[in-house]
């Protein structure tokens, strides 16, 4: 597909819409915490919940019963209207573009939340055309309702077609904030023979060679490695963020932590928390480990110019390890600025 000219890319898509952002605000987004907004008891706890999470997301799509879609939409508006969320970002996951509900989601949520809505999470994105549609739709709503700050878009990668076009999706609009892996829908779309929401599968493994009838070593492999790696490259090449999505086995915090850790090490900025118990897991995993931060500080101190070569404990350091160290330190500074407990762990 031929790209728009850079000038057209950054021109508002409707007269009176705000200019597309060239730089995205540097925000900490370690966990995107999902809440079902149709439930009164959930809405009542938003005030205390908001301070614990980087991103609060009102979910209108899957997991919201069909007969509660309108209440969920009204609840999402009430959450944004009735709470001061401070540094916590407010996102809404709308219904899929081929569903009967997404039109009202857009027509009610955007005008009523306006500048208090940071990001729309769009599910089941199949290709750049879905992002272009939302981009134009949002520009018209922003112009009509005098919204000052362009609302950003976050795509869920959860169809085989979407994976095939992930690079084009990432580059489709200056509104793109990031992409999350949606392993449950992706499994269904691909015809994977699983019944899980993310995580590994005991049958996806490799066996060591036959061993004269003796026991053969067997190692479980990561079902999501290929997709996550491809998504991370597509996102970072486009200058946007990558996220691991949901981990559905709430009763298995260790496996959740491992899945998040793999995503963190591979370049993801955060993951979804579907239950309050997963907030702390995501916070720990997506905040740099204090020992890594100490090592990163040593590397930067050993090469104050940002290049050349140095040896630390027998390991070669050069411009590339300096850049890795800086990436960890930049994130640690962001975490420390938000959270004094982490600042003291980092000894900043
Ligand atoms: C998330 O929406 C998923 O399908 O995994
Ligand atoms: Mg899904």
Image: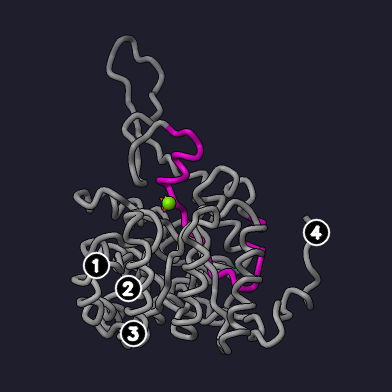
* Helix, strand or loop under label 4: loop
Residue that badge 2 annotates: 75
Any part of residue 294 in sight: no
Q: Residue at x 54, y 57 (%)?
A: 97
Residue that badge 1 annotates: 39
Q: Is residue 184 magenta?
A: yes
* Badge 1 or badge 2: first in the primary sequence: 1
* Helix, strand or loop under label 3: loop
Above or below: residue 35 compared with residue 156: below
In the drawing, does residue 219 fall left or right of residue 44?
A: right
Residue that badge 3 annotates: 85
Q: Closest to the observer: 287 or 202?
A: 202
In the drawing, does residue 112 fall left or right of residue 19?
A: left
Rendered-image quadrant of the C terminus: bottom left
* Badge 4 or badge 1: first in the primary sequence: 4
Above or below: residue 177 compared with residue 278: below
* Helix, strand or loop under label 2: helix
User: Quarter-wise, where is residue 282 in the image?
Assistant: bottom left
Q: Is residue 218 magenta?
A: no
Specify start and end residues of the magenta stretch as a single range: 167-192
Q: CA distance from mark 2 to mark 4?
A: 41 Å
Q: Residue at x 28, y 78 (%)?
A: 50
Above or below: residue 287 compared with residue 101: below
Nearer the camera: disc 1 or disc 3: 1
């Amino acid at each position: 597909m031929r790209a728009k000219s850079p000038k057209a890319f950054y021109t508002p898509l409707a007269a009176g819409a705000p200019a597309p952002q060239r730089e995205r605000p540097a925000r900490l987004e370690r966990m995107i915490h999902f809440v079902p907004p149709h439930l009164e008891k959930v809405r009542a706890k938003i005030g205390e919940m908001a301070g614990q999470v980087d991103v609060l997301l009102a979910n209108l799509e899957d997991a919201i019963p069909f007969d509660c879609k309108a209440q969920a939409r009204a609840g999402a508006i009430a959450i944004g209207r009735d709470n001061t969320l401070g540094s916590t970002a407010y996102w809404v996951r709308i219904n899929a573009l081929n569903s009967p509900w997404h039109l009202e989601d857009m027509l009610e949520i955007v005008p009523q939340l306006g500048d208090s809505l940071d990001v729309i999470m769009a599910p089941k994105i199949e290709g750049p055309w879905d992002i272009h549609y939302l981009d134009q739709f949002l520009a018209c709503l922003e112009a009509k309702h005098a919204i000052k700050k362009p609302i950003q878009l976050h795509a869920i990668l959860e169809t085989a077609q979407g994976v095939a076009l992930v690079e084009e999706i990432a580059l489709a609009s200056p509104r793109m904030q990031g992409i999350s892996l949606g392993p449950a829908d992706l499994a269904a779309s691909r015809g994977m023979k699983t019944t899980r929401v993310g995580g590994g599968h005991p049958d996806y493994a490799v066996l060591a060679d036959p061993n004269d009838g003796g026991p053969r070593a067997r190692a479980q492999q990561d079902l999501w490695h290929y997709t996550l790696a491809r998504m991370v490259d597509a996102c970072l090449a486009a200058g946007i963020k990558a996220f691991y999505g949901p981990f559905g086995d709430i009763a298995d915090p260790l496996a959740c932590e491992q899945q998040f850790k793999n995503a963190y090490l591979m370049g993801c900025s955060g993951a979804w928390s579907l239950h309050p118990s997963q907030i702390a897991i995501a916070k720990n995993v997506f905040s740099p480990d204090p020992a890594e931060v100490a090592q990163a500080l040593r590397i930067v101190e050993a090469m104050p110019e940002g290049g050349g070569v140095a040896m630390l404990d027998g390991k070669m350091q050069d411009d590339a390890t300096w850049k890795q160290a800086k990436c960890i330190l930049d994130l640690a500074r962001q975490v420390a600025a938000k959270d004094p407990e982490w600042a003291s762990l980092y000894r900043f």
